[in-house]
Image (cartoon, rainbow, N blue to C red):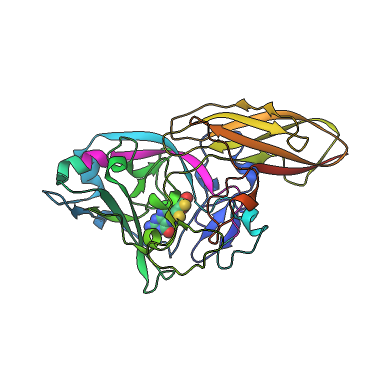
Amino acid sequence: MYGKRTDMTVHSELPYNAEPPRGALAGTTLTPVDAFYCRNHGPVPEADGSDWRLRVGGLVTTPLTLSPAELAARFEVCSETATLQCAGNRRAGLVAVRDIPGEAPWGPTATATAVWTGVRLADVLAAVGVVEGASDVEFVGTDVSDAADPPQEFGGSVPLRKARMPEVLLAWAMNGEPLTPVHGAPLRVVVPGYIGARSVKWVDRIEVRDRPSANFFQASTYRLLPPDAPVTGTPGEGVELGLVAVNADFLLPDDGSSHPAGPVTVAGYAFAGGDRTVVRVDVSADGGATWSQADLGEQASTWAWRHWSATVELPRGETEVLARAWDSSAALQPERPEHVWNPKGYVNNSWARLRLHGA
Ligand code: MTE
C-alpha cells in the first residue's frame, strides 16, 4: 500500500499506519521512502497539487496565500537532513509492562530519516510580518480525523522561536523525489528535533498565534500523563510533548535470533531531539555489569539520528543484549520501561533490549 515494502507491519489500514522491519532501517542514514514509517490519524487526502494553496495568517501584518510553485519562486529553496520520530515509537515496550487500550503497539521503527527539500518557514514568516505579542505558530492539514469529537483537521503548533529557526521547512520533496501522497504531498511541515506530530502533512493553513494550538492533537493528545492519571482528553491535561528525548534501539540482528556463541555484531540507531546530538552509545551483554562503547556512524546533521554498531561476546543460551545512548547534554536513557510507563504510551526511551540465543 502507498508504495511501501510488502513486509511492513501494518497497525491499521484506515487510517494507514505502518512501520518497516528493523533491518530495513539498517546500514543507511537516509531511509528509503518505501521503508519510511507512516503515521496517520485520518484518511490520506486526495490532493491535486495544481489547486493547492497555503494560507498564512493570524498575528501578521500581511497575510499571504501561496501555491507551492509561488513558494519555490519567492523564497530560497533549501534542503535539510532530519529524523522524524513518532512520540509512540517503541510503545510495544510499554504495553508489555501494562496494557494501553486504544493505542497501537508500535515497535522501534516509527522513526526514519530523509533529506527534506522546501523553503524555510522563517522566510515565510518574515514575509508576512509577525506582529508583537505572537508566541506560537500553528500548522493545520486538510485531513480530517474522527479521533477528535467532533472530527477535526490534524494540526499542532510550535513556539515562534522554533518556527523561526532555519531548520524548520515547508517541504515538497523527500530524498530528492516529490513527496508521495501518504507523506504529505503537496506540502508538509518538517520540524526537526520535535515529535513527528508537529511535522504536519498536507498543510494548507499556518496561523501565527499568541498561545499554543487548541487543536485536539496538541491540546488533548500527544501529552504525557502521570502513570496513575485517567485519560479524559480534557484539553491541557498532562505535559505537552515537543522536544524528542534521547532514544535508541537495535536494528540488527533480529530479536530472538540464534547465532553461534562467540563474537556477534549488533547495530542500531540513536537519536536525540532539540538541538542535542548523540555522543555515545554503550552496549552490554552481561545485564549491565560491564559496558563497551559502540562505534558511531556519521552525524549527517544536527537533526539526524546516528547509526551505531558493536561486537559483543555471545555466551551459549539466552542473552539479553542492552544498548543505551547518551546525548550532548549528558542525558542518558532511563533503564526500564516501567520507569517511563504512561497511560497513552508515549516516549518509551528506556534502554534497548535484544534477546539473542547463543548456540
Ligand atoms: N499530519 C497530518 N496532517 N495528519 C497526521 O495524521 N501525523 C503526524 C505527522 N503529521 C499526521 C501529520 C505524526 S503523529 C507523525 S509521527 C508524522 O506525521 C509521521 O510522518 P510520516 O507519516 O510522513 O512518516
The residue shown at (65%, 40%) is 250
Q: Is residue 65 left or right of residue 182?
A: left
98 w.r.t. 115: above or below:
below
Give whichever of 49, 341 is nearer the camera: 341
State ligand 1's quadrant. bottom left
151 w.r.t. 266: above or below:
below
Q: Taking the image as drawn, is residue 143 in sight?
A: no
Rendering quarter of residue 203: bottom left
Residue 106: image location, x then y, percent: 59, 55
Give the magenta range: 105-124
217 w.r.t. 336: above or below:
below
Q: Taking the image as drawn, is residue 309 in sight?
A: yes
The count of marks equals 0
Q: Is residue 280 left or right of residue 68?
A: right
Residue farthest to the bottom? 150
341 w.r.t. 259: above or below:
below
The residue shown at (21%, 42%) is 124
- Is 119 included in the stretch rendered in magenta? yes
Rendering quarter of residue 175: top left
Residue 316: image location, x then y, percent: 88, 37
The residue shown at (28%, 56%) is 204
Q: Is residue 276 left or right of residue 135?
A: right
Q: Is residue 48 left or right of residue 133?
A: right
- Is 341 included in the stretch rendered in magenta? no
The residue shown at (46%, 59%) is 40
Residue 359: image location, x then y, percent: 88, 39
Residue 96: image location, x then y, percent: 68, 58
